[in-house]
Image (cartoon, rainbow, N blue to C red):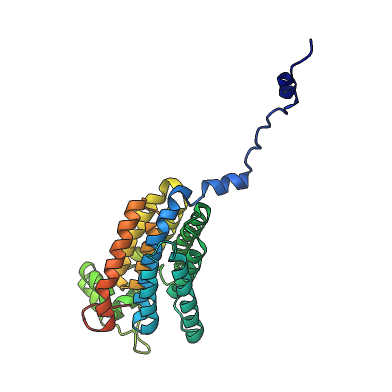
Amino acid sequence: MAKSRRQKKKERRPAPVSPPAPSLVHGTLAFFQIGDAAQDTMRLQPLRVALLLAIALHQLNSFPMIGVAFFGAAALSLVPGAGRWACLVGFVLLAGRHVSTFPDVSNHSYLESVLLLLLSLGDERRKEEGALALQGVRWLTVLVFVWAGLNKIWYGAYFDGRLFVLLASGRESFAAPFAQILSADEWGHIAALDPRRIGAGPFLPTSSILPAVANASWVAEIAIGVLLLIPATRLYGAIAGLGLLLVIEALMREVTFGLVTANLLFCSLPVRSQRIGAAVLGGIVLVLVPFKLGYLSGFDFM
């Protein structure tokens, strides 16, 4: 009996081939995938606005015209579709400032430049580009924390706590908390040190409190970087990172570093929490503007 055309077509179809098993490298990269394409495009605008505002505050005192331009770029980034161009303008401005003032450029400013470049490449109208841009930002966040911890190890002044003695002897905001927890004798020794005087010292603690705190700082930074890298622990890493930033800001008042890094950590929180966090950062910047310009006093910027 002659076969029907439908039966012949079924016979001609090749048997389905199962996809090859993922390689070890592919599986590892998939495990450490830092991004969610479905939500990443929603994160770009608050990230850009908060970053541009933080940079505006940073530049406002030394380079007021650049600071004003960044405030304008932050306003432009609120316009749908204009955020990447606002970041590109900001990158060009910051790159020009780096060239004109090199080598007097802070590490924070280099970080800001890389972030601006990343955020100028991602088009939120394309989910793939938005996901790629946010993955780059999240990877950079991991590198910031891990590198900060490794740098403290290589610096070598954290193991015995001598750097903390130096900072406590010369910076009031850093000294105030330790004045409450150290013994009267040890605090009297530290308060008598003058880091500006040649031959002053030795800057060594007499108890284990300062070495313990100093070593806990680099351990915490590396641990936070690892937590941010693993999807299951990323939220806990972001929360721990924000807690560490609060401690750093209380001691050092590194406002620009704190604002920029908090903005990065918000990208590992739920979308709604990130938007709230970005709005809080924007409010902090606006509150600090009169202090930065010198119209108000009482806040010590680092």
Q: Residue at x 38, y 50 (%)?
A: 235
**Residue 113 as seen in the image, left or right of residue 195:** right
The quadrant holding residue 254 is bottom left
Q: What percent of the width, then of the height, locates residue 61?
A: 33, 83
From the viewer's perspective, tell me whether residue 24 is left or right of residue 288: right
The correct choice, above or below, for 100 with respect to 187 in the image is below
Q: Nearer the viewer, residue 240 or 101?
A: 101
Residue 200: x percent and y percent? Answer: 35, 86
Q: Most extreme residue toward the bottom, as rendered?
A: 198
Left or right of 275 on screen, residue 176: left
**Which residue is at 47% across, 51% downward?**
35
Q: Is residue 118 left or right of residue 169?
A: right
Visible residue check, residue 235: yes
The residue sitting at 50% across, 84% down in the picture is 103
Image position, residue 25 (x, y; %): 61, 48
Against 185, residue 275 (above or below) is: above
